[in-house]
Image: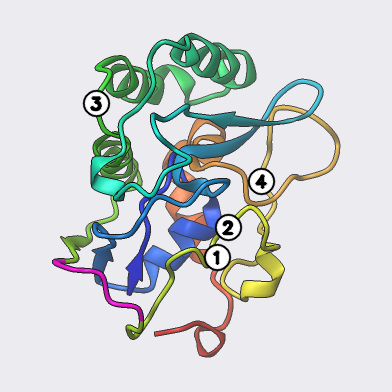
Amino acid sequence: MIIDLQYLPSLEYFVSLLQHDNIVIEAHEYYEKQSYRNRCIIQTTNKIDTLSIPVKNGNSKVLIRDLKIEYHQDWIRRHWGAIHSAYGKSPFFEYYSEYFKNIIEKKPDFLFDLNLELLSICLKLLRLEKKIIFTEKYEKNVEGDFRSKIHPKTNFLENGIYQPIAYRQNFGSEFVPNLSILDLLFCQGSQSLKILQSSIVNEQTIIN
């Protein structure tokens, strides 16, 4: 499969990764605004909150490997404050949170590097071994194309990748599906991979 790098991706993203041994990361695309490349969704006390990373020259045609993060805005404090407020009392927050906090506070220059390091730690915490390789050039038509398939403007039900399996969340009486992987890890810890595996839709409906 080939897929774009996303910021603390959704459960749908990880369910798609589960079904492929080799993960090809698109490294030569142009940055796409209003996508999950620089945003994630978490559940807070009163609402669903979207955390967005500001980027430099996001309105221009910039290759994703060259897209720099904007640090003049204090987004790190905003993001980590929201994450801590949402999950600070979760069962597994104290075990996992420092991994993510340390990566974000390193302030990498490029969004691609930040997303890759966050993806790597997520796979490690899930105990999910995958071979990750990178595209050497951009190709419009490729087999197993998941680029921009998982997108804020596309309901996950349309993709036929992820079927929600409810687990105990911090807030509300109704389960909220397909949040950032942070929600699952902080709430369910070592059970996270099992829940993701149970969330796979019949493989025949998925692009291979």
Q: Earlier in the sequence, mark 4 or mark 2?
A: 2
Q: Earlier in the sequence, mark 4 or mark 3?
A: 3
In the image, is 203 to the left or to the right of 6? right
Who's the residue at 81% across and 22% down the image? 46
> Which mark is nearer the camera, 2 or 1?
2
Q: Quadrant of the N terminus?
A: bottom left
Residues rendered magenta in the picture: 136-140
What is the three-letter code of the residue carrying label 3? Asp
Who's the residue at 62% across and 13% down the image? 85
Residue 203, percent across and down? Answer: 50, 84
Mark 3 nearby-residue class (10 Å; few <14, some 14–19, many ≥20)? some
Q: CA distance from mark 4 to mark 3?
A: 36 Å
> Which mark is nearer the camera, 3 or 2?
3
Give above or below for 151 relative to 69.
Answer: below
**Pointer 2 residue:** 151
Residue 111, percent across and down? Answer: 32, 36
What is the three-letter code of the residue carrying label 1? Ser
Magenta part, dominant SS: loop
Q: Earlier in the sequence, mark 2 or mark 1?
A: 2
Q: Earlier in the sequence, mark 1 or mark 4?
A: 4
What is the three-letter code of the residue carrying label 2? His
Give above or below for 144 relative to 48.
Answer: below
Asked if the residue at tag 1 contacts the one at tag 2, i.e. Cβ–Cβ closer than 8 Å, the answer is no
**Pointer 3 residue:** 109
Per the rendering, the mark at residue 167 is 4
Which residue of the protein is positioned furthest toward the bottom in this rendering?
Answer: 204
